[in-house]
Amino acid sequence: MSPVPTSSDRDVVSELTTGRLSVYLRCLTFLELQGQKTVSSAELADRFHLNSAQIRKDLACFGEFGTRGVGYDVSQLKQQLVQELGIDRTRNAVIIGAGNLGMALADYAGFNANGFHIVALLDIDPVKVGRTSRQGIPVLAYEQLDDVVRRNRVEIGIIAVTATAAQIVHDALVAAGLRAILNFAPVQLRLHEGVKVKSVDLRINLESLSFHLKKVEDGMT
């Protein structure tokens, strides 16, 4: 039996590892829904096109879960990953920007299930204030940010505004006490110490795909 990892061990777990934990969680959720009780790292890798050695290495960061000759208990490992990812309780989030992107994010099932809940969208446009998304998420005035965060114990801020407004919104979220921000604006933000920001820039991904296509066209692959 491997020793229980210390808090310092967990501090050095990379973002790539935590990203893979999310993938493993989705795989285990699927297996649980299928009624499967146990799974080996080899089967998990084969069924979901993963790397069995990487799976074992990643899970070893958090302790010893498998049984030699049997594999992992699907439900127990799933619950352990839920706890490690901190989604064993609901984390409230708020979206800044009630445009097309903000509305789409508010209605995205992944943002309102499995540990996350969008409590509101905030916008400066008085025409949008008072409306709701298709799923009933209210659009409130941006000026209510501090109050919304405090009353709803919001922990995550989601930026869905233009690039020119993103820094102002980011600073306002930090001032409201948030320490976790998901940024969809196509801009590099000036960060604050102690605040974690994850940026999703679709254009960067498209440019990466374009680079791959160019290599193919140039006969480099």
Image: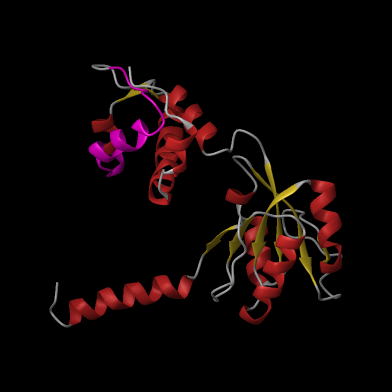
Vertical order, 108 against 215 (above or below) = above
Q: In this orientation, which residue lies closer to the viewer: 88 or 171? A: 171
154 relative to 34 in the view: left or right: right
Query: Residue 127 colored magenta?
Result: no
Numbered range of the magenta stretch: 47-67
Vertical order, 217 against 58 (above or below) = below
48 relative to 117 in the view: left or right: left
Looking at the image, which residue is at 83% across and 50% down? 150
Q: In this orientation, which residue lies closer to the viewer: 195 or 70? A: 195
Looking at the image, which residue is at 59% across and 65% down? 183
Residue 113 is situated, as x and y percent measured from the top left of the image, at: 62, 43
Q: In this orientation, which residue lies closer to the viewer: 62 or 110? A: 62
Q: In this orientation, which residue lies closer to the viewer: 36 or 86? A: 86
Q: Name the quarter where the N terminus is drawn.
A: top left
Looking at the image, which residue is at 30% across and 17% down? 67
Quadrant location of residue 203? bottom left
Query: Residue 52 colored magenta?
Result: yes
Residue 42 is situated, as x and y percent measured from the top left of the image, at: 23, 32
Residue 166 is situated, as x and y percent measured from the top left of the image, at: 65, 74
Vertical order, 67 against 120 (above or below) = above
Count numbered badges in the picture.
0
Looking at the image, which residue is at 86% across and 62% down? 144
Q: Name the quarter where the C terminus is drawn.
A: bottom left
